[in-house]
Image (cartoon, rainbow, N blue to C red):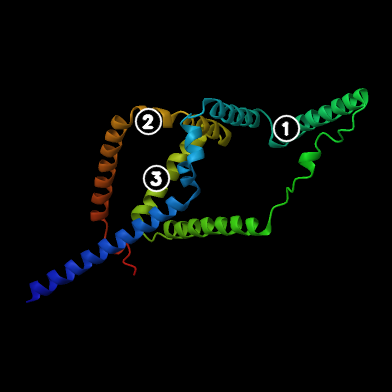
Amino acid sequence: MADTQSSQISSSQGLADGQNSAKDSKFTDSFFSSSPVSLIQSPQVKDLVYWRDPKKSGVVFGVSMLLLLSLAAFSVISVVSYLLLALLCVTISFRIYKSVVQAVQKSGDGHPFKAFMEKDVSVPPETFRKHVDTLLTYVNKALKQMSRLFLVEDLVDSLKLAVGMWLLTYVGAVFNGITLLILADILIFTMPLVYEKNKTQIDKYVDIARTQINTTMAKLQEKLPASMKRSKTE
């Protein structure tokens, strides 16, 4: 009788662990699926990074790389000032040119930027509130994740974060933030094409690596004391 009761208790505990693990997994999946990272799944972004339109992708890649290289060589204030100065030079030169042409031809076309000046560039309150609400959702989810990790709700997840931060200290010793952004920009516009052409081989090795990591984490979870294992929250 005692053996039967103990087996029932252990099976119920295992079921609770599975349910909580599934709940945590669903929460994490929902967080990342609704985070800004999911922007890469939008058709416009996918068309850019997969170079469906080489001209458009080339322009976006070139402008972003030029901006990042400028930020690496100059301060943010200098880069912004030069960009605004260049824009002003273009608009002022075009304004003077059109004024001279109108004076010579004695035409009454008016201001060359009249069509743009008449457009409403104000942000509607509804649109602003919508974006603020979306941002607030991301912030709340990020704060909840940070609370879980830094308050060690799950020791394994907190250890993963600690290892990741430890590795980033070495990355930070070699690269600065702008260099990492430049590398990220290059990878964003190259890796999708590489993956698309070698999808089968890459998926095979990714599955092997994922299996090894999951096995290692499962063994680590088994060796932890019962009080440090994944918390059994409802």
Q: Quadrant of the C terminus?
A: bottom left
- Please tell me which residue lies in front, 20 or 73: 20
Residue 229 visible within the image:
no
- Please tell me which residue lies in front, 21 or 164: 21
Q: Is residue 33 above or below residue 206?
A: below
Whether label 2 touches label 3, CB < 8 Å? no
Secondary structure under tag 1 reads helix
What is the C-alpha distance between the residues marked 2 and 3?
30 Å
Residue 1 — which label? none
What is the C-alpha distance between the residues marked 2 and 1?
36 Å
Q: Decide: few, some or many residues near mark 3? Use Cα within 10 Å; few <14, some 14-19, many ≥20.
A: few
Q: Which residue: 69% across, 36% down?
A: 76
Point out residue 102 in the picture as x, y percentages from the top left corner.
Answer: 89, 27
Q: Quadrant of the N terminus?
A: bottom left
Secondary structure under tag 2 reads helix
Find the residue positioned furthest to the top: 104
Secondary structure under tag 3 reads helix
Q: Nearer the viewer, mark 2 or mark 1?
A: 2
User: Label 1 is placed on what type of residue?
Assistant: Leu
What is the C-alpha distance between the residues marked 1 and 3?
40 Å
Reading the image, the residue beneath label 1 is 83
Q: Which residue: 42% across, 32% down?
A: 192
Find the residue positioned furthest to the left: 1
Query: Which callout, 2 or 3, points at the residue further toward the start of the chain?
Result: 3
Q: Decide: few, some or many residues near mark 2? Use Cα within 10 Å; few <14, some 14-19, many ≥20.
A: few
Point out residue 133 in the picture as x, y percentages from the top left corner.
Answer: 57, 59
Q: Which residue: 78% across, 28% down?
A: 90
Reading the image, the residue beneath label 3 is 163
User: Label 2 is placed on what type of residue?
Assistant: Glu
